[in-house]
Amino acid sequence: MSTSTFSSTGPALAAQRPLQALERAEPAAEIPATDIPAVAPFRNHRPSPRRWWALLSVAAWLALWWLATELRWVPPLFLPPPEAVIKAFGQAWRGDIQGGDALWVHAQWSSVRVLGAFTLAVVTAVPVGISMGVNRWAQVVLDPILEFYRPLPPLAYLPLVVIWLGIDEASKWLLIYLACFAPMALAARAGTRNASAEQINALRSLGATRWQLLRHAVVPAALPDVLVGLRIAMGFAWTTLVAAEMVAATQGLGQMVLNASNFLRTDIVVMGIFVIGAIALLLDALLRRLEHWLLPWHGR
């Protein structure tokens, strides 16, 4: 008897206690808006301090280089001093080196090969990667070939490329093109996964066609990864340049470096490395600028 009575009245009493507590509680004091501390906006990118530290790091490495050559820690044949590299730059710019072509001519030929092969890779690899991401049959057919040749070094299939296309410009372009194709296609394929199921279902419920799904959902979602793939492929293009210009080239930065190494002109070799690195950094900066322009919200 007592148990049934408790069970029927217990929940009602328990429900009344919070109400009574709220009635007895004093109303919360209002906090003036001026007493709320302001919170600084969150920022992921803080380029200014990093740039200063990066400049200090470069200056420290240059000072260590000068000190090592000045105190003869390393023989000049292995590591030429900075003034010898600057002198070699002047000689190469005037064309007073082996071959007789000026430095800007070598840079022009190398840039044409790299940018030409890179552009061909962009217009073919990105559509292939997106098709692999949205179509299982395209992935089944193309993914094994891509995964097989991707880790191969360019020097491994260089003789085969020469047999196919000879020693003209086509073999050099194909070698750089193959080095750029794999990272671009893989990045585009991975980027297609960024399109959420909610976006796809929302567009399909509105009657979007397959082409409209690609244009308005898949491609915009894949664009950040595609741009990262372009930057990686640009680095691969310049690393493959020396191997490409080993094939009967008479102009080009890679050919200039190889030719100078045959005569133990390490000052020209180091100068050529700096020129290749400077052009690669400039192109990478342009791709970063393109990324900020196309995706101003990305990473913020």
Image: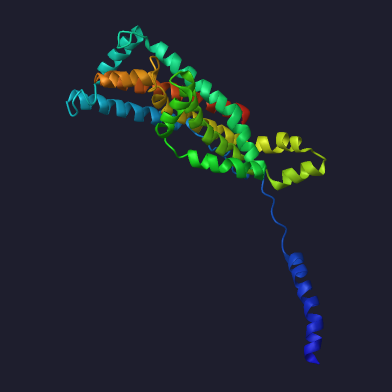
Residue 63 picture location, percent across and down: 27, 26
For the N terminus, the quadrant is: bottom right
Residue 223 picture location, percent across and down: 62, 34
Height in image: 44 above or below 121? below
Query: How many labels were placed on the picture?
Result: 0
Whether residue 297 is visible to the viewer of this picture, yes or no, is no
- Judged left or right of residue 27, residue 226 is left
**Looking at the image, which residue sits at the far left?**
72
Height in image: 68 above or below 146? above
For the C terminus, the quadrant is: top right
Frontmost residue, 256 versus 277:
256
Q: Quadrant of residue 267?
A: top left
Q: Quadrant of residue 266?
A: top left
Name the residue: 53% across, 32% down.
181
Frontmost residue, 83 versus 277:
277
Q: Quadrant of residue 78?
A: top left
Height in image: 20 above or below 259? below
Name the residue: 25% across, 16% down.
84
Residue 277 picture location, percent across and down: 40, 24
Name the residue: 42% across, 15% down.
107
Residue 76 picture location, percent across and down: 20, 23
Whether residue 32 is visible to the viewer of this picture, yes or no, is yes
- Judged left or right of residue 278, residue 16 is right
Frontmost residue, 127 versus 172:
172
Name the residue: 28% across, 22% down.
261
Frontmost residue, 221 versus 64:
221
**Looking at the image, which residue sits at the far bottom?**
1
